[in-house]
Amino acid sequence: MNNKMVLACDLGGTNLRMAAIDSAGKILYRLKANTPKAERADEVVQAIVDAADECRDAVKDSGDIKALAAAVPATINPKEGIISKAPNIPALDGFRFVSTLSAELNLPVILENDANSAAVGEQVFGAGRGFQNTITVTLGTGVGGGVIIDGKILRGVDGTAGEIGHICVEPFGAPCGCGSRGCVEQYSSATAVVRLVRELESQYPHSALRNKLKLTSADVYEAGTEGDELALEVFRQMGLYLGVALAGLVNVLNPEVIVIGGGASAGWDLFVHHVREQINKRAFREPAERVKIKRAVLADDAGILGAAHLAFESFG
């Protein structure tokens, strides 16, 4: 009954994950629900409250819930507790998240960007454990990033630091949803892997991927493990462009470790040597030799574990 716990919420565009977590990072109860395709913020709030209530009830005999921490795919104002812009959940644009949830749950609430939360999770509990200067990159539908310097999240004056996916690696390249062109997100995400196959397939008439319907990045990886030349070329380009972006970050931030996760990191064996090659070619020698490139180990739990750690730091 003396256990201190927090609720941690990872609010994605598709799924809402909620967990009760103790101070050692042990997940005592978890659930996953659909994120409402809502036009009003109160519908999303209600889904979070319902999930929180279920978690609270499940662990009510185990100790006290101290706070709720939420990781959201959004630009945030952590001091004011406001979601500035949430492209995948537009109903939350401009929403006073912290004050509303705190009143609904009668708990202290903290708000964090999802990529920052994942970076904290990997640094404290995962592949970045033991390091104080880390960069975490998530290769999913897009490319997300979180930067931790001297043990603290790098936010920048507007709270937008860490947008690794929007580093330009090809000035006249593919248009990006952010409004720019040639962002690394357009070359190293799961979505990019599929697009590159379509762009290159005419050059590889014998590829098993040619004209394949409903192609996924997992299909490309499977073909690559079987030696398909088109798939191998796509992962070469994916790793090359990611390596170019990361080499610049090595020069600017001098990290101890770069952690790479997300669904598209399943292709690790096919692209990571290209990443390392570019870092070695393009970054200053000593930082390039120092930095470790590690695969993330926490998968979908990185965000909730990172959020929980931040809550214990604030309210523990």
Image: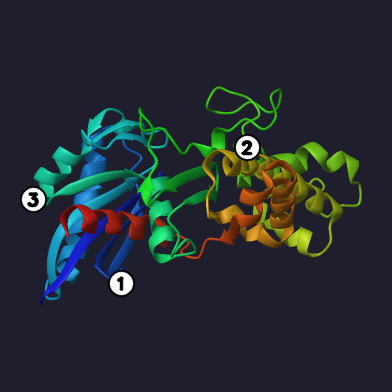
* Residue at which label 3 appears: 106
Question: In the figure, is residue 185 to the left or right of 19?
Answer: right
Mark nearer the N terminus (2 vs 1): 1
Is 275 on the left or on the right of 230, as rendered?
left
Q: Position of residue 120 (x, y in %)?
A: 38, 54
Could you say which is closer to the camera, residue 54 or residue 229?
229
Q: Which mark is residue 26?
A: 1
User: Which amino acid type is shown beneath numbered disc 1?
Assistant: Lys
| Image coords of residue 233 (percent x, y) | 81, 48
**Mark sitting earlier along the chain (3/1):** 1
Question: Image height check: is 8 above or below 246?
Answer: below
**Secondary structure under badge 3?**
loop
**Element type at marker 1?**
loop
| Viewer-side residue, 145 vs 257 | 257
Compared to residue 65, the image places residue 205 above or below, namely: above
Which residue is identified by label 2? Answer: 184
Are discs 2 and 1 less than 8 Å apart at CB? no
Question: Alpha-carbon distance for marks 2 and 3?
Answer: 42 Å
Whether residue 206 is situated above or below residue 4 in the rendered picture: above
Residue 269 location, quadrant: bottom right
Q: Name the residue: 37% across, 52% down.
A: 151
Structural distance between the alpha carbons of marks 3 and 1: 23 Å
Local packing at callout 3 (Cα closer than 10 Å; few below 14, some 14-19, many 20+) is few
Which of the two discs, 2 and 3, labels the residue nearer the N terminus? 3
Which quarter of the figure is the N terminus placed in?
A: bottom left
Q: Amino acid at mark 3?
A: Asn
Specify the amino acid type for callout 2. Answer: Val
Residue at image point 22% right, 38% down: 97
Mark identifier at residue 176: none
Q: Say if residue 243 shows up in the picture.
A: yes
Q: Nearer the viewer, mark 2 or mark 3?
A: 2
